Image (tube, rainbow, N blue to C red):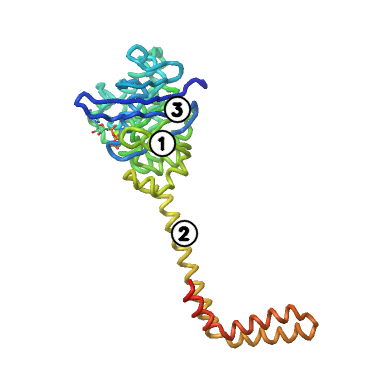
């Protein structure tokens, strides 16, 4: 399956009202990669993802998925390889029942009717929505709709899984289940999200989209810890990394507390310390260790003059 790569070359896309949403997007994603797509509202993430399964066709430039160049003739075949979970689940769910919605994709793939129920139930179970199978999708809560939308795609067992903001309506437990599902998915996965912790957890690579083109592309850890890059794209460090930097600050506050404690100790016992160094210097001299004695006398002198040394250091730094 090594041919299941995705390649965008200088892709431009303009919506019918004239808005240019993609302005020269280029990248290549190899089989098995996990790629996060991040960027500000309106950057072009959803537009880009809708090109990967041929839901939209580029105004110019080229897109290759596996061995197929995307155009109006190949888009049906490309959709068999690429499963896209839309940002808005209402765009995905249109059948009278949840079961029918999840069955729709596999039926179109030509899966036999007797194996459909098994596929549908497995997919719904994976997202924790099996008990909803007979409900009409428009009676579901937003989070339930999102979970069912994910089931419609995983039921097709795609080679390339593309998800647009899959966690935005999910409660913490369902979000965690989604992360585990994504981690277990072995083939190519491409996930657009403002949930940068999810991206960090699931994706090895991260592409930043700005004004419809690639602004940065690299290892997720490097991109998602680059505060300046993120802030330039209306994003913030993932919460998990923010916690780490708070921890770093608190460590340095602890260090300040330790230093203060030491300084107080020195102030209180300085004369005793100085006397100790003088005694040690004398002992070393007696033992014929004159170099060590010299060093200890230096420390004794410095300790005696500690307050003036401190004042001097404060002036210099
Ligand atoms: N159907 C449409 N008709 C006209 N313009 C559109 C349409 N959909 C999106 N756009 C415009 O295309 C640009 C990219 O939108 P897109 O939805 O791809 O952004 P996004 O990065 O997914 O944003 P978000 O983070 O809000 O989901 C925006 O300027 C948007 O206004
Ligand atoms: Mg979007």
Q: Percent x, y for residue 114?
A: 40, 14
Q: Position of residue 87 (x, y in %)?
A: 30, 32
Residue 264: x, y in percent? 50, 80
Q: Which residue is mark 1?
A: 207
Q: Residues within 10 Å of mark 1 (few under 14, many from 20)?
A: many
Vertical side of 84 occupied by 203: above or below: below
Badge nearest the viewer, 2 or 1: 1
- Of circles 3 and 2, the one toward us is 3
In terms of sequence position, does the residue under pointer 2 or pointer 1 come before the other?
A: 1
Residue 19, picture quadrant = top left
For disc 2, the marked residue is: 248
Residue 252 vs 220, above or below: the answer is below
Q: Residues within 10 Å of mark 2 (few under 14, many from 20)?
A: few
Q: Which of the marked residues, 3 or 2, is nearer the chain's N terminus?
A: 3
Q: Label 3: how many residues lie within 10 Å, few (<14), some (14-19) or many (20+)?
A: few
Residue 57 on image: x %, y %: 31, 20
- The residue to which callout 3 is attached is 28
**Alpha carbon separation for disc pair 2 and 1:** 27 Å
Question: Which secondary structure, mark 2?
Answer: helix
For this rendering, which residue is in front, 138 or 271? Answer: 271
Q: Residue at x 47, y 44 (%)?
A: 222
Left or right of 314? Residue 196 is left
Quadrant for ligand 2 reads top left
Mark 1 element type: strand
Could you give the CA–CA distance between mark 3 and mark 2, rounded to whole angstroms? Answer: 36 Å
Which residue is at the far left? 17
CA–CA distance in space, label 1 to label 3:
11 Å
Observer-nearest of 273 and 137: 273
- Mark nearer the N terminus (1 vs 3): 3
């Amino acid at each position: 399956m090594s041919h299941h790569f995705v390649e965008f070359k200088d892709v431009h896309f303009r919506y019918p009202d004239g808005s240019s949403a993609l302005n020269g997007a280029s990248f290549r994603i190899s089989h098995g990669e996990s790629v996060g797509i991040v960027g500000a509202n309106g950057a072009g993430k959803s537009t880009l993802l809708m090109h990967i399964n041929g839901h939209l066709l580029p105004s110019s430039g080229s897109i290759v998925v596996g061995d197929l160049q995307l155009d109006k003739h190949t888009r049906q075949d490309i959709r068999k390889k690429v499963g896209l979970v839309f940002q808005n689940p209402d765009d995905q769910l249109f059948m009278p029942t949840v079961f029918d919605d999840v069955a729709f994709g596999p039926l179109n793939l030509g899966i036999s009717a007797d194996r459909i129920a098994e596929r549908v139930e497995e997919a719904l179970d994976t997202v924790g929505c099996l008990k909803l199978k007979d409900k009409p999708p428009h009676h579901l809560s937003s989070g339930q709709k999102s979970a069912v939308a994910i089931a419609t795609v995983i039921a097709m067992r795609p080679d390339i899984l593309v998800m647009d903001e899959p966690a935005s309506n999910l409660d913490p437990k369902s979000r965690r289940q989604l992360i585990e599902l994504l981690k277990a998915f072995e083939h190519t996965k491409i996930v657009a999200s403002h949930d940068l912790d999810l991206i960090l957890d699931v994706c090895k690579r991260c592409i930043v989209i700005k004004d419809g083109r690639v602004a940065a592309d690299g290892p997720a850890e490097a991109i998602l810890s680059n505060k300046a890059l993120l802030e330039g794209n209306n994003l913030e460090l993932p919460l998990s990394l923010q916690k780490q930097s708070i921890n770093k600050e608190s460590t340095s506050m602890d260090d300040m507390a330790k230093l203060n404690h030491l300084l107080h100790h020195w102030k209180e016992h300085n004369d005793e310390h100085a006397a100790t160094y003088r005694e040690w210097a004398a002992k070393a001299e007696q033992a014929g260790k004159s170099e060590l004695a010299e060093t200890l006398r230096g420390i004794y002198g410095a300790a005696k003059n500690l307050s003036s040394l401190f004042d001097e250091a404060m002036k210099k730094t």
